[in-house]
Amino acid sequence: MTTTPRSASADGPVMTGAVDPVRLRLAAVEVVEADGPFDPRTTLIKPSHFPSPFDAQGEQDYRAVTFVDGHPTGLRASFTDSSPALRLEIYLPERAETDPTDAAAVLRARLGVDQDLPGYADLCAGDEVLSRLPAAMHGARPSSPWSLYEYLSIGTVLQNTTVARTVQMARALAGLLGTWYRFPDDVVLAGFWRPGDVVDLGEPALREAKLGYRAKTLTRLGAQFLADPDTETRLRAMTGDPQALRAGLRSLYGVGPATTGYLMFDVFKSLDELGHLPPWEAKTLGRLLFDDPGTDPADTIAWCHRRWAPYTMLATHAVFETVFWHRATGNGPAWLDDLIRL
């Protein structure tokens, strides 16, 4: 590297080798206003998410580099406290073949800006639990910039471990497989890899990087997507049939009930989807809703559906994310830190 990149993460980038990051140029700008309850900050900035070399949460913006139709695409989504509008900037490498207008349309959908939420504002106003949340949380939408394959790669390092371990594995993957990109203001982020790259690298190299059993999951997933490049398109055709979509997602290697729930909500925007709670999330919601971390997860799920359908997961997400916002501002409960263990 000729210069030291300025990372958007407090822990700094984890770059390997001596190759300069790929330079990005500003290719398009859109100002977007969403229909229905929408708060750009709580939609884009998720304090519950782990620190990652792949994206950056700022005070007034969110950045990532993602594949759109097979091409690396940088995004910066920025906002102000005085306006509900979102400024979406599309960045591309020099001589990229991507149509920035098409890329913006894909990213608007991934960020949740294009959703319609009829009746949700009334649900929030009339519900005893939701009405006590900060008003900004009523506008928090499922938002992820990632393709299905990228999201699954993230989900793999989230499984059955602490946040600190997840952060370590994400950095290892960025160093082994990621491509680094430099925005015009010198912010550097890692981009993901293509499925064939992880297959070529092989399971032994991933195990050597201390990824454990996830080395097998990542190589199997890579092989699946390499064999069927239209996997995401095929699954998106099932969004009108949640049962078929769940089954399709569960057919992917390593995808269990917890990852299926995350995918249904974050990637496919299924706003009523709540069928499984991983242990630490069950403890968190049990304490928040019933002051009892030992509440049976099945009872919590049934209670939420009775109260908040057809927006069960969207409302549950608002409750869950609120306590992380309190933590981010120094007002979080001590028991939450014990659960996170970062």
Image (cartoon, rainbow, N blue to C red):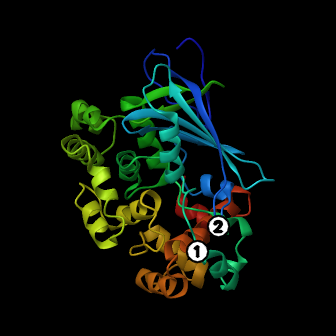
Q: Residue at x 59, y 81 (%)?
A: 289
Number of residues whose C-alpha sits closer than 10 Å to that of mark 2, classed few (under 14), some (14–19) or many (20 or more): some
Residue 309: percent from the left, percent from the top? 50, 82
Locate residue 62: give its quadrant: top right
- The residue identified by callout 2 is 36
337 left or right of 218? right
**Amino acid tagged 1:** Pro
Number of residues whose C-alpha sits closer than 10 Å to that of mark 1, classed few (under 14), some (14–19) or many (20 or more): few
Residue 167: percent from the left, percent from the top? 48, 45
Residue closest to the far right: 82
Q: Residue at x 30, y 48 (%)?
A: 214
Which residue occupies the foreground of this view, 65 or 257?
65
Mark 2 vs 1: CB contact within 8 A: yes
Q: CA distance from mark 2 to mark 1?
A: 7 Å
Q: Residue at x 51, y 28 (%)?
A: 92
- The residue identified by callout 1 is 118
Which residue occupies the foreground of this view, 342 or 117?
117
Q: Which mark is residue 108?
A: none
Residue 153: percent from the left, percent from the top? 36, 46
**Amino acid tagged 2:** Gly
Q: Helix, strand or loop at disc 1?
A: loop
Q: Helix, strand or loop at disc 2?
A: loop
Q: Is residue 315 above or below residue 182?
A: below
Locate residue 329: give its quadrant: bottom right
